[in-house]
Amino acid sequence: MAAVPDGTAYGGPVKRRDFVMRSLAAASAVGIPASPEELLDHATVDPMDQLRNVLTGTVACVTDPSTPKALALAVASAKRQVQGCRYAQLAKSLPGLLVELEARRASADDQHQVDRVAVDAYHAAASLLLKNGDAASAWVAAERAMAAARRTEVPEAIAAASRILTHAVAAVGHRRQGIGVAVRGADQISGSVARSSPDTVAVFGALLLRGAWAASAANDRDTAAALLKDAGRAAELLKESNRHWTAFGSNNVSLHRVSIAVTLGDAGKALAEARNVNVAALAVAERRAVFWTDVARALHACGRTEKATAALLAAEKEAPQEVRSRTVVRELIGDLLMCDRGGRVPVLRSLASRAQVAV
């Protein structure tokens, strides 16, 4: 075989020997380990590990937990962090809060009050784990919420726990069972649903919406449509609100119609439904970010990369951590990058950089 002169298409403007040497230098720059310890001693810390340690009982119990009132205030703050998409802060504070709750429940005379607080605390834990793609651990947390709710025997608490349990079970992949959890929970509380009981209406409606989502994930269009319809009827009894941390109302029902249409593969229908959502009226940042993310998913399905990117930028503006840390959103950014190999949407590269998605 004849020698290939330097500077040809094979070698390019860089000589092959120089190219090899530069490649080795680049490899050395990232630090080739000389021993296993160099890698093992610098293992990446998963921010969810401390929460998993609490759920598995491998964290020492505190001996002087806070009062039920103080715990209730702390849990309310945790729920606000979930709805505000402040996940990094929540991951730091929630494990210690759960440890205190368990210690207080084990020793207090006012266990009923502590259990009511525990429902929301474990709901927040499951939500955080689901946001981080750990459905298995979320199921454990959701079961803790349900156990506390059953001890209270309060219908609203049981419905609230059923909502997060539906989400966790379906997220693991057991979608039919998730639908069953939602339907049973809704049946238990349906007799108490009335305009004079707004908290009951809120948790009932939110549970129906979660059941509709589980049905869409199972590709059960009829059940999804029926549960959405019932949720719409419930919303007629209640003004838009954030009662019982549900953000439930007619606007939230419209938002779920978008999300469910996307899940069912009806991108065109999702975009049509999106016109019915009053984004400004969505009081919870997490809901606004989810709406824009669902719109981005629908636009991406329609091949509209630039507009999908614009929707993600709107989501990022509402809740940066929702866009930059969630695996599902980062995967969407990666898909958009694949569709825009020519670089026609420069802001997509900037977004990918902020979300630490490889360009």
Image (spheres, rainbow, N blue to C red):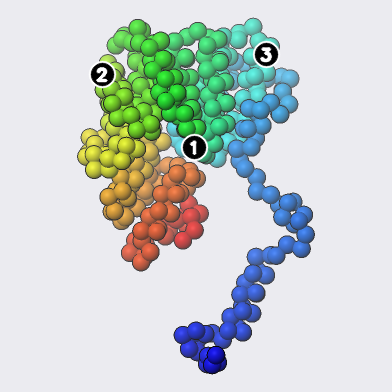
Does the rendering let one see residue 66?
no
Q: Mark 2 belongs to which amino acid?
A: Arg
- Please give the residue where the numbered disc 2 appears in the rendered image: 233
Q: Residue at x 65, y 16 (%)?
A: 104
Residue bearing mark 1: 131
Image coordinates of residue 119 in percent, x first then y, are 52, 19
Compared to residue 226, the image places residue 334 above or below, namely below
- Rendered position, 341 above or below 86: below
Q: Nearer the viewer, residue 17 or 105?
A: 17
Quadrant position of residue 208: top left
Task: Pick whichever, 224 or 119, lies toward us.
Answer: 224
Q: Residue 47, located in which quarter of the rendered image?
A: top right
Give the residue displayed 52% in from the left and 11% down from the top.
150
Query: Where residue 289 is drawn, which disc sits there?
Result: none
For the point 46% across and 85% down, the residue is 9
Residue 286 coordinates in the image, percent (x, y): 41, 36
Task: Identify the amino acid type marked 1.
Answer: Lys
Give the mark nearest the N terminus, 1 or 3.
3
Secondary structure under the numbered disc 2 in the rendered image: helix
Q: Which residue is mark 3?
A: 106
Q: How packed is label 2: few (under 14 Cα within 10 Å), some, or many (20 or more)? A: some
